[in-house]
Image (tube, coloured by chain):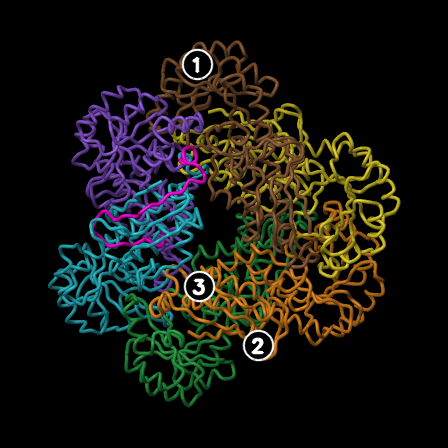
Chain colours: A green, B orange, C cyan, D purple, E yellow, F brown
Amino acid sequence: MSLFCADAFLSPLEIEATVTRALEEDLGRAGDITSVATVPEDAVGRAILNARQVGVISGLPLVAAAFRRLAPDIEIVPHARDGAATAAKTELMTVSGNARAILGAERVALNFAGHLSGIATATAAFVARVAHTRARVICTRKTTPGLRALEKYAVRCGGGYNHRFGLDDAMLIKDNHIAVAGGIAVVLKRAKAAAGHLVKIEIEVDSLEQLREVLEVGLADVVLIDNFDLQSMRQAVAMVAGRLAIEASGGITLNTAAAIAETGVDYLSSGALTHSVQNLDIGLDIEM
Amino acid sequence: MSLFCADAFLSPLEIEATVTRALEEDLGRAGDITSVATVPEDAVGRAILNARQVGVISGLPLVAAAFRRLAPDIEIVPHARDGAATAAKTELMTVSGNARAILGAERVALNFAGHLSGIATATAAFVARVAHTRARVICTRKTTPGLRALEKYAVRCGGGYNHRFGLDDAMLIKDNHIAVAGGIAVVLKRAKAAAGHLVKIEIEVDSLEQLREVLEVGLADVVLIDNFDLQSMRQAVAMVAGRLAIEASGGITLNTAAAIAETGVDYLSSGALTHSVQNLDIGLDIEM
Amino acid sequence: MSLFCADAFLSPLEIEATVTRALEEDLGRAGDITSVATVPEDAVGRAILNARQVGVISGLPLVAAAFRRLAPDIEIVPHARDGAATAAKTELMTVSGNARAILGAERVALNFAGHLSGIATATAAFVARVAHTRARVICTRKTTPGLRALEKYAVRCGGGYNHRFGLDDAMLIKDNHIAVAGGIAVVLKRAKAAAGHLVKIEIEVDSLEQLREVLEVGLADVVLIDNFDLQSMRQAVAMVAGRLAIEASGGITLNTAAAIAETGVDYLSSGALTHSVQNLDIGLDIEM
Amino acid sequence: MSLFCADAFLSPLEIEATVTRALEEDLGRAGDITSVATVPEDAVGRAILNARQVGVISGLPLVAAAFRRLAPDIEIVPHARDGAATAAKTELMTVSGNARAILGAERVALNFAGHLSGIATATAAFVARVAHTRARVICTRKTTPGLRALEKYAVRCGGGYNHRFGLDDAMLIKDNHIAVAGGIAVVLKRAKAAAGHLVKIEIEVDSLEQLREVLEVGLADVVLIDNFDLQSMRQAVAMVAGRLAIEASGGITLNTAAAIAETGVDYLSSGALTHSVQNLDIGLDIEM
Amino acid sequence: MSLFCADAFLSPLEIEATVTRALEEDLGRAGDITSVATVPEDAVGRAILNARQVGVISGLPLVAAAFRRLAPDIEIVPHARDGAATAAKTELMTVSGNARAILGAERVALNFAGHLSGIATATAAFVARVAHTRARVICTRKTTPGLRALEKYAVRCGGGYNHRFGLDDAMLIKDNHIAVAGGIAVVLKRAKAAAGHLVKIEIEVDSLEQLREVLEVGLADVVLIDNFDLQSMRQAVAMVAGRLAIEASGGITLNTAAAIAETGVDYLSSGALTHSVQNLDIGLDIEM
Amino acid sequence: MSLFCADAFLSPLEIEATVTRALEEDLGRAGDITSVATVPEDAVGRAILNARQVGVISGLPLVAAAFRRLAPDIEIVPHARDGAATAAKTELMTVSGNARAILGAERVALNFAGHLSGIATATAAFVARVAHTRARVICTRKTTPGLRALEKYAVRCGGGYNHRFGLDDAMLIKDNHIAVAGGIAVVLKRAKAAAGHLVKIEIEVDSLEQLREVLEVGLADVVLIDNFDLQSMRQAVAMVAGRLAIEASGGITLNTAAAIAETGVDYLSSGALTHSVQNLDIGLDIEM
């Protein structure tokens, strides 16, 4: 059974590196001194990973990687995979093997599972609000330092989609770029001239006037309309008429999402999906 | 003017390593392709870091480090330091220098500032609720993977105190350790026999009976009373009578904090301070 | 004076990391034992970086970084910048300072400059052949392991453009993907469903029949026509009629480039630009 | 069956580190997004590594390491080993296992195999030209940054031998060292005084006069005669009369190699073997 | 059979990282060139790790890790575990497998075993001298750079206990801290105010007067009496009367240890245990 | 004034990397919590590095690097350089600047200085015993894991010379290589055939018979006579008659060194110089 959510992207080497760093952070120089002092080296145990809240799961491959990193021969039996919606009490995985390894990796495993499932759950709530429209919910670069790829994966687990992963994989022209370059026409021409043929160009506009100029220049793939009211959004959708994709952003919340999606925009982006999320309560029940 | 909060601990090498990793994550292979395409290499700018919400600041040394990492000669003028409580609109720092460096480090700088100030602000709210008591608010190991040292620093910025930083700097005996070892007396003896003379021992108990046994054995420095009701907490405080420190934990919220603190326990610990926090809204106003 | 080629992308942290790794590789454990044995520690020198061949320069920021890594206060005066076309003998940079640092970084600096200028020069030759058309010359992922970002930067220095930087920043659907998915329509639908809104989709076709199917499905941004003859290329251009971009690939050489470009395709890609390139002869003339 | 060329040196840890870095470079943050979107996670495939050109193979251990890094249990069956001369079409290795892992590591594996086999093939051509003499063909430090150990291994696969691996494993005294030290006698004495008993000393000379002085001083193990004409080389060989080894360098090409080797010099060194090499055409034929 | 000493702390990730670094240091760029040149790639061998001196063993997990790092399937049969006291000639471990891997890891394995067993042996000698008292022997932060966690583990193998592992896991107030803060009372109050509830505070005193002040202030957990004579130590023990733990330090040797321990102090600390230790003679007898 | 010993080799990048690792090891996650709690952030101080014992200094560049790593603008005034012989009390360096940085780097700086000066001092004592002969004292690969380059530098500071730095920079044929290859003649031929022209070959012999065979084969540069008695050494010197260098090894001590050197051997090697050395007592006197 796969641990991964289908169609959600995450480099396997990223998992390895991030899990190792997290374990090093927790084990420090001396390791789990409590368990070494109190649990025999050859003791074995069995642990059940449990979701204790309704939510959407993300992070199981990291949980497995954390336990395997300390005990390569530990036995892992998954009962769910990332992207699954859980009831209030759901067994996600059974882990059997060396007791010290289970105790030593427990907190790291739970920190990954709780954080990423929190993002997936928040995303799923957002997605549900706009499910009657064609709008997609997307994340931003407002992610926790060091965890971007993981958090973007978690957004996918929750049914959302990803904005760019960094400053280097797409162009997003903002007000400062426009100002320095000397206007929308010139900035778009410069961007298009420099961009590779597989690099999309998005441009942020603050007004319908700017949007009109973007449409006239015609080199952008996506326009980001920032802090538009609903009426302006509807006008924007009409003006654009499908010629480019429209991303709405700016303080979008669960409560405003449906109305915004109904204006006909293509994407709703929310930084809060990744930067202000409640952990999902996931625990480990251990028997030794 | 110092950027650091007084009495809050953070290794300078940790700052460097974490900021570099975050910038590498955002810049990727090609760097900030939008700015390279649209902003001249020698353009200069000035940016003001602004708190746009009431809160407590944390992360200014990381903000400064992010800008300096891309432009060592950038000019940084701080207007506040970590630990400061801000009004709804407060200028925190002025950054002047190479425009591409400002744009290239902007998101990383803000991600650190928003996340850590969110933790400091949440901590300060908690601390305010118990200010009329002698109880201290403390964090846990439920931190974001890779950011533990930074998040523990942020808790201090908010007026809280730190639990252990990892599995290796103090012993915390939990139910599984007790079960495997065969009881409270034996587990405490094993722990004390193994612990160095600068390592404190904390033990988690689920009942007053367990607490009584801990007091009889007498080798612990701190007892963690988990999910006790207020009445049991008061009894625990009376039983302990100052012989060891008492940490209360288990789903403590802003609403329950005052009542718990009033029972006379020494410490209230909350994982939510670090794992479920709202970003503080901090932005960068750039002039070029 | 800038060292960088305008509009060519390269993360500054990538430069630092790659230069450090190269110096560690050359200095090994004991460093430059010949110079330590024979040149006084406080000796100073002056060195001129010279292009000894006609070509296009790339790599000057790496040259400067190599010398500065061993002697932060070394003086660097550039006489050219990346992207410059040089005569048979052209002074590129003057480096003045500690003699041991100059000798210790010399080979690393030259290895970067010669290799990247070789790529820029080869690219420029290619670009010249198609200058009378609207076709752009682009690179591939057939790069030297560990140097991809640098080599893609060098292609830009020579007037070329970049294909994707890795497996993660754009989709390129090849024959195996089509075969496993079960045909062009289904593979494109799957790709589009999974792709973020800033991710372009390119698909490789082997025949005009496949191209027709791609056009009917209509979800691709770019089509890669692989090993088409000139006649088929012209037919492809006519069929596509500007609805998506066309990349021609497959053993394109300097001799065939013009004819291919004249068919009206948008991009000519060549792995040889990065994987089979002659060093440009660049030397360092040192006076001590 | 071994993958390695006999008598060619390469640290196993170097392979691991270089392959991991190359895969990280290609997979980036999100990994192989095309294959995740279009190929089922549990799909399996079989791939044949094919040499499509006559040449000498190098890099098979890196090919195997790349596939194993993404799928430790992948099955690898070698049909050739490094150092083998291949016909125009030769199967080198069969790889069977997870389809995404095969597709994800394909380009990295081919980049290593093509580059290193290119070096081995170029070296073998050189070696063939001097096979009727006792001269050995050797490489230099003009290698691709980050790949020195691998490229020196590839030279051995082609029948060549290695010059020093870095600045620290042998002394090579050049004109600047001589100039700063104040002459050949003093520089050789300084070098010999400082050199460990397992460190050889080579000195570069530009004239027979300098060579005479080197012979008189008598502390060198090897003399490098740089840019000598054939007549001078013969005189040098006669003068040296076997008292030290002679390395000829300076723009040696396939066309001039035989004549130079016939002068009686011991070593011909060529930077072009590693810095200006044509990839060998090696491909991966995948069946899924 | 376990390789580890019971109750001695060492993070498993620390072992991996340190062993890899040591092997990289020894193998360099080209690896074990002697063995590659002279031992067939598929040769196998058997090696016995032998203690050739009376002592206490430490380092077997690192020995095993070194061999496994070069040959994951090597067979390791332990005959002793860390902490064991050995006779003059004792077989510790049998290693069977690839001959080149055994030869390539031999020196690294022995360097770990000899160094750490040297520390364990020196510690055991110290411990033996004070065995008739209740004093414990402890180490310091005077460790070999890069090996602190390993050396502290070795001290435990010899029967000693560990002082703090770094500057961050306990407070140790020294003369400079007292001077800057302005006296013992103020420094202890500052330290206590800042310290987390699981951080112990130790303070160094130079005189009984200072000790008296420490006792009056009452916030320290441990007092370090530095360079006290025996008479003063006895007075200190009497003054303290069990209210805090006493660590004696300052040039303590094997010869003075018993008398010091008999004064009633709790801990004797010695930097020499880790910074000035004789290797234990451990060798590898190889049969091929 | 230089900090480095003349003619002693050490890569500057090695210093940086090793010092950073050592500081990270000591500062851990939270840094120097005692100093942060008790010393104001802007306090400054002055510290004198003092040798408190007669000895030979090594490690001053690492001391300087440690302080500079925590405070780049710290002022360093050297009063001695590595390789200097000191009286019982000698000021080596004055360090002025941020007090927390001085306290935070103190222990790391002293650990380097004490350890490396200990090696230099032990080496100098050895060198003094053989000063009336032409024999050189050399180290081995029996070094502390992770510190080889530094320890070999320290041996040079003490007047000794270096054996190979790793398995890759020279060949040392031992009994197992001879046995597997099938005798001295064949092993030497294999080694010579594989060795590059700048790689020396040393072979270990256990008897005069083996030495005779080595001389007959004639391909070695150095012979290592292991555990020969004085009489056999003299015979070996006579037999060799200058045709190759002779290294004597095997339990050589200060007491036996002179007699061994007087036999006429070229090199005396001692593992104890690096693996069993007493720290030199170097302290830091701080005024704040």
Share a chain, discs 1 and 2?
Answer: no
Q: Secondary structure at mark 3?
A: helix
The residue that appears at 39% across and 82% down in the rendered structure is: A265
Residue B26 marker: 3
Place of residue C196 in the rendered image (x, y in percent of width and height, measured from the top left): 38, 70
Q: Which residues are magenta?
A: C35-62
Query: How far, Cα to Cα, is label 1 from label 3?
Result: 63 Å
Residue at the farthest left position: C231
Q: CA distance from mark 2 to mark 3?
A: 27 Å
Q: Chain of mark 1?
A: F
Please indicate, yes or no, whether residue D268 appears anywhere in the rendered image.
Answer: no
On residue D107, which mark appears? none
Amino acid at the residue labelled 1: Leu
- Nearer to me, D29 or D216: D216
> Which numbered dot is residue F211?
1
Residue type indicated by callout 2:
Thr
